Image (cartoon, rainbow, N blue to C red):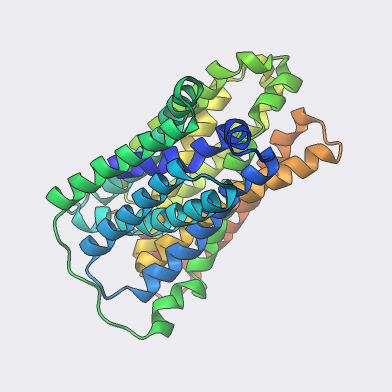
Amino acid sequence: MTGAFTLGLDAYVMAGLLPVVAADLGTTVALAGQMVTVFTLAYAVSAPLVAGLLSGVRPRALIIAALAVFTLGNALTAVSPSVALLLGSRAVAGAGAGVYSALATAAASALAPEGRQGRALALVMGGMSAGTVLGVPLGVLIAGQAGWRATMWLVTGLGLVALAGLALRLPGTPAGPQVPVRERFGALTDRRVAPVVGASFLAAVASLGLYTYLAPVLGAAGGVAEDATAPYLWAWGLGGVLGSVLAGPLLDRTGRAVALAGALLAGLVLAEGALPLLGAAAFPALVLWGAVGWAFQVPQQQRLLGLGGGTVALALNNSALYLGSAAGSALGGLALAGGLPAERLPWVAAAVAALGLALHLLTAARARRAPARETPAEDCPAG
């Protein structure tokens, strides 16, 4: 969980450090912001690529190696004297993070006792959400007191702690069978896997993309001043941690990943749709939004494992999350620049989430009509 916490912290803290990084390196905020883009792209590309090409290697060795690359990238970020080296170091960290995230998720499910795979997946997702919700404000606070490089040394130190813990305590799991490269990447074109990953992408666009503009939304819809948004951010974050942790036991108890994922998407539509109507009293909607947005990936990951996509499918899903977050932020910015009132942006996000729900329901309906040999995989009971 320490490794997942560090990933969640590192993935989002840099966005809050852009002004101080730009000032320190003598560049523009726009150019410094490309380090977020580089990290995201490296994460998205490396995850399915490496997971597919190295599918025959023992997972324990790969997990430790990926976390080591991630930690090295953060250390290089902390000492980077120029924008060029900074961008290169973020690419290294993103590549390590992408591979580690997918492999750690698969290993957590494989090592969990029968009937507790959902809890194991939720533990990984809970670590990432906690790193985002709790770690990011801490990292920004440290940067304000000791500089942005101190924050990156914090991330590096946490990575080393996680690395030592894995090296000492992570049990070995057998490597997957050696299969042709074409079959390893079959998840990329699998007609059952692609719609699941597509729903994850749309959910990330709607949830994480809107989160970028929460301050202007609250200001326009409820008259909340920018310096008074912290309680609202914490409400969203608290919901995220609770949703991530509680989704696993619920999935293990019911064994109905498809139904749970659909209910969570419906909750996301409801929460974002209610946000402008509640204005300054939006705390319940924010808690619900954070909870269902983060919890959604727990049944999604379980479904992908049940479909037989393996680590490549999980890596593809993780890539979709980061790309969806980036796409949502970009599209939200374009919408606001084009004149869309900020208080209407949650309704646009809710429409995107509704599109994801429609895709999910169509996929589930198609699975029910599929031959019997495919039905168990799409039903994907937690056990």
Q: Is residue 91 visible?
A: yes
The answer to which of 355 and 105 lies nearer the viewer is 105
- The answer to whether residue 60 is left or right of residue 14 is left
Percent position (x, y) of residue 346?
69, 34
The answer to which of 16 and 177 lies nearer the viewer is 16
Tell me if residue 14 comes above or below residue 371 in the rendering.
above
Tell me if residue 310 comes above or below residue 180 in the rendering.
above
Q: Is residue 357 visible?
A: no
Residue farthest along the right direction in this orientation: 339
Task: Tell me which corner region of the image, top left, top right, bottom left or bottom right, holds residue 110.
Answer: bottom left
Percent position (x, y) of residue 246?
34, 35
Q: Residue at x 55, y 52 (%)?
A: 87
Percent position (x, y) of residue 121?
32, 48
Task: Tell me which corner region of the image, top left, top right, bottom left or bottom right, holds residue 104.
Answer: bottom left
Quadrant of the snapshot with the C terminus:
bottom left
Tell me if residue 241 comes above or below residue 230 in the rendering.
below
The answer to which of 276 and 70 lies nearer the viewer is 70
Q: How many marks?
A: 0
Q: Residue at x 85, y 41 (%)?
A: 338
The answer to which of 174 and 110 lies nearer the viewer is 174
Quadrant of the snapshot with the N terminus:
top left
- The answer to whether residue 78 is left or right of residue 358 is left
Q: Residue at x 45, y 72 (%)?
A: 187
Percent position (x, y) of residue 43?
48, 57
